Image (cartoon, rainbow, N blue to C red):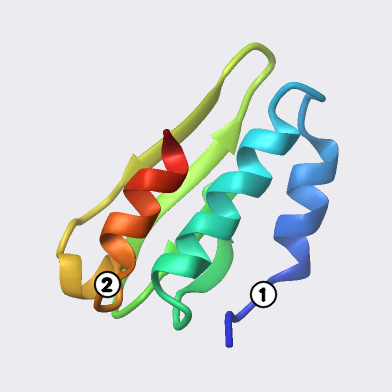
Amino acid sequence: MPKIDKRIDAYIAKAQPFAQPILKKLRSLIHKANANMEETIKWGMSAFYYKGPVCGMAAFKQHAVFSFWKYNKRHLCQKGARKQMALSLT
């Protein structure tokens, strides 16, 4: 079960209209890839943790950002989810 942080809901709601569906999709894919991922707000942006910081997303006036802090397929994706995540992004 994903560990949802209501502050992320508020962050997405405050984002520019173009960024909201992007952030929602990324959030969904992150939790689909690893159901144990924890959400939080760090440095004023959405952050996702699993055994430490893994990735984050942010929205600005004219662009949205998704970044990895560290990559280890064991941390990001549960078995079989990596391919599904890649397909969902296309």
Instruction: Tell me, yes or no, whether the two marked residues, 2 and 1, touch with CB atoms within 8 Å.
Output: no
Question: As rendered, which of 41 and 65 lies closer to the eye?
Answer: 65
| Residue 88 picture location, percent across and down | 46, 46
Which residue: 69% across, 15% down?
Answer: 61
Residue under the image location 58 percent in, 17 percent down: 63
Q: Is residue 62 above or below residue 64?
A: above
Q: Is 7 in front, or is 83?
A: 83
Please tell me whether mark 1 sits on a helix, a strand or a loop: loop
Viewer-nearest residue: 81 or 71: 81
Position of residue 45 measured from the top left corner of the image (x, y, whole percent): 57, 46
* Rendered position, 66 above or below 49: above
Crowdedness of circle 2 by 10 Å Cα count: few (<14), some, many (20+)? few
Quarter holding residue 64: top right
Mark 1 Cα-neighbour bin, 10 Å: few <14, some 14–19, many ≥20: some
Can residue 22 be seen in the rendering of this structure? yes
Image height check: is 23 above or below 59?
below
49 left or right, relative to 45: left
Q: Which mark is residue 4?
A: 1
Determine if residue 44 is in view. no
Q: Which of the image's four quarters has the N terminus? A: bottom right
- Quadrant the C terminus occupies: top left
- In the rendered view, tell whether residue 69 sits above or below residue 75: above
Residue 16: percent from the left, percent from the top? 78, 24
Viewer-nearest of discs 2 and 1: 2
First in sequence: mark 2 vs mark 1: 1
The residue carrying mark 2 is 80
- Seen at 75% across and 61% down, the residue is 7
Q: Amino acid at mark 2?
A: Gly
